[in-house]
Amino acid sequence: MTDTPLPSSDPAEAFTTEGSPEPGETVHEARLWRDDGWTARVIKNEDDEGWAVEMIKDGEAEPALVGPWTMGRNKKDPKPLDTSAFNTLVKTASEVLRRHEQQLRAQLHKEVRVASADGCDELDITLDIVPDEDEPYAVLTALDTFGEQLAQVQVAPNFKLSKASATAWVENGFRRPG
């Protein structure tokens, strides 16, 4: 396999968005690859003499992934993007986004299991934080073993859900804590 010659690495000829294809339009160029809802763009690495690649999901302002990119044979210009590299980058960037979503979900959703007031059953108590910019709040919910909602109240976004606080809420007849 041979490296395809690329335009000069002269900063004056750097990538610009003027005249760029519309998002969603398929592009397969040496330094710009747009397909399947993603854009890969090879850029000059600000930290050193090398190159980097950024992966941007359509509709997003910030890249999901920025990483080093391989130099071409002339040790001056970047290696051109290709189908295999693009597919690998999409897979990696998708995984990064999935992990961010999981982390956010873990921060905004808590769950504990406690005994019911009569002690004959178990209840799942969930806390879902709604990070509204103006008025954040949280929703405390009690579910029976079949997933049926028994109670739900709005609480402060800094409410600490624990087995003890959930048990106290159940024993207090699901009245708003606080």
Image (cartoon, rainbow, N blue to C red):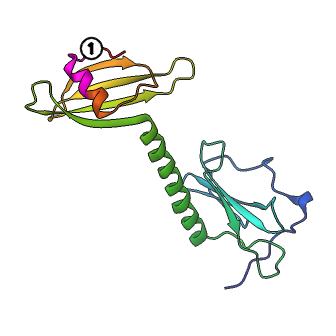
Residue 73, placed above or below residue 134:
below
**Is 103 in front, or is 34?**
103
Residue 156 on image: x %, y %: 44, 20
Q: Is residue 171 magenta?
A: yes
Residue 54 on image: x %, y %: 68, 57
Secondary structure of the residue carrying numbered label 1: loop
The quadrant where residue 130 appears = top left
Q: Quadrant of the C terminus?
A: top left
Residue 68, placed above or below residue 156:
below
Residue 18 on image: x %, y %: 81, 47
Q: Quadrant of the N terminus?
A: bottom right
Residue lying at 44% horizontally and 35% vertically, measured from the top left = 108
Residue 178, placed above or below residue 51:
above
Residue lying at 67% horizontally and 46% vertically, measured from the top left = 22
Residue lying at 10% horizontally and 30% vertically, measured from the top left = 119
Q: Residues within 10 Å of mark 1 (few under 14, many from 20)?
A: few
Residue that carries the numbered disc 1 in the rendered image: 175
Q: Is residue 132 left or right of residue 55?
A: left
Residue lying at 22% horizontally and 16% vertically, measured from the top left = 172
The residues colored magenta run: 167-174
Q: Is residue 49 magenta?
A: no
Q: Is residue 125 left or right of residue 1?
A: left
The quadrant where residue 35 appears = bottom right
Q: Is residue 56 left or right of residue 140?
A: right
Which residue is situated farthest in the front direction here?
A: 164
Which residue is situated farthest in the bottom direction here?
A: 1
Q: Main secondary structure of the magenta part?
A: helix
The quadrant where residue 169 appears = top left
**Is 107 in front, or is 73?**
107
Q: Amino acid at mark 1?
A: Arg
**Is 168 in front, or is 106?**
168
